[in-house]
Image: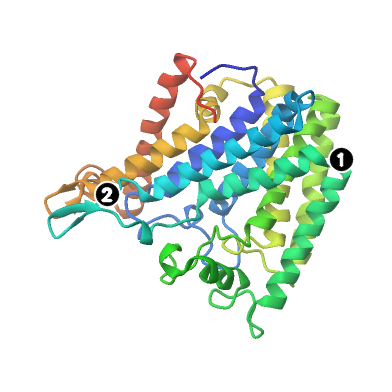
Amino acid sequence: MTNTQRFPALDVFRGMTICLMIIVNTPGDHLHTFSPLLHAKWHGFTPTDLVFPSFLFAVGNAMSFTMQKWENRGTGFVLGKITKRTLIIFLLGYLMYWFPFVANDNGQWALSPVSHTRIFGVLQRIALCYCLASLMLYFLKEKLMVIIGIALLLLYWVLCVVFGDAADPFSLPGNAGLSLDLWLMGDAHLYHGEGVAFDPEGLLSTIPAAVNVIGGYVAGRFIQQKGKQYETISVLALAGFVLLVLAYFWNFVFPINKKLWTSSFVLHTVALDCLLLALVMYIIDIRKQRSWTPFFEVFGKNPLFIYLLSELLVTLMYTFRVGDTSLYHWIYQHVFSFAGFYWGSLLFSVCYMLLCWCVGYWMNSRKWYVRV
């Protein structure tokens, strides 16, 4: 746990992502959630759909600073570092889904079966995207890396069309990613939140997701080279606008879809992240308005730890019961439901986010920054 020199706008950007991620993941009542805080059911886009790709964008942005430390290191050291981080983050994600490792079956506690534990997920995707992007960034020139990123988006489009269902290759039951995941892992290891076995963080859609990391890296390198000035922010905003237009037209033939992580979705989210980062830089570095930033910096300085804390604590709240209901729902019903279905649900998620923030604030006050 060490403290290093930080990029304030990046901490704020990443903190905003974690803050919104916790809010959308922990509503008091999932059946009564304001629509902007829900993912698009299939094709389409909501503000919530921007959260995860923004975190990947922030990972790439941070890599543009940390990768410079590897320039004078040997290949063996770098590959070892990449492998270690990839395995740790992937394992943390897997253990998070297995946690609390036991289940109550008719009053009897028993070890949760590994045979039904989800293999892929949010942290696992971060790990794989980090690994793929890191290897490209270390061995390739920046221009070649951008070209390969574009090629990956086109390749994913082709794979979806060729190996998906001929009638509708972009449907839930007919997409190529589902077929690959079922073949590799079987339905027991996939996410079942859609009512059927389908993992929105599956293996095939990890290919275009890595481009979100590359986009964040390119933006970070550009900021370092040009400095925090009007020209930098203008170019960043212009790049976001151009990508937004490209995503709009690509959407007609390859629909924007977060759960398939389509290539048009990648362009759309990278565009919005460029615009958002430009706005944050303008407010912080040009206008010097920083009174609001410490709140989000608390999240941004310990993003992985706070995210894990938020997920594990929720799991425990669902595991322990008060009478016939889980502790999670008991708290909502007896403390927050008085505000009404929708507002009570939102109030619950905001208070839970603030609870996680308090832990982050306590760690930050002691200069504890958890890294892998």
The residue to which callout 2 is attached is 318
Tell me: residue 169, above or below residue 368: below
How far from the left and from the top, in percent, is residue 313? 33, 40
How far from the left and from the top, in percent, is residue 260? 60, 64
Whichever of callouts 2 and 1 sits on the residue coming sooner in the sequence is 1
Name the amino acid, label 1. Lys
Which of pointers 2 and 1 indicates the residue nearer the eye?
1
Residue 25 is labelled as none
The residue to which callout 1 is attached is 141
Q: Secondary structure at mark 1?
A: loop
265, 120: nearer the viewer: 120
Mark 2 is surrounded, within 10 Å at the Cα level, by few (under 14), some (14 to 19) or many (20 or more) other residues, namely: some
Name the amino acid, label 2. Tyr
Left or right: 104 as drawn, with respect to 364: left
The coloring applied to the image is: rainbow
> Residue visible at 23% across and 44% down?
331
How far from the left and from the top, in percent, is residue 13? 61, 34
Tell me: residue 55, above or below residue 290: below
Q: Quadrant of residue 361?
A: top left
The extreme front residue here reads 76
| Cβ–Cβ under 8 Å for marks 2 and 1 | no
Q: Secondary structure at mark 2?
A: helix
Left or right: 77 as drawn, with respect to 94: right
The extreme bottom residue here reads 167
> Residue visible at 50% across and 42% down?
20
How far from the left and from the top, in percent, is residue 286? 74, 23
* Residue 282 seen anywhere in this rendered image of the structure: no
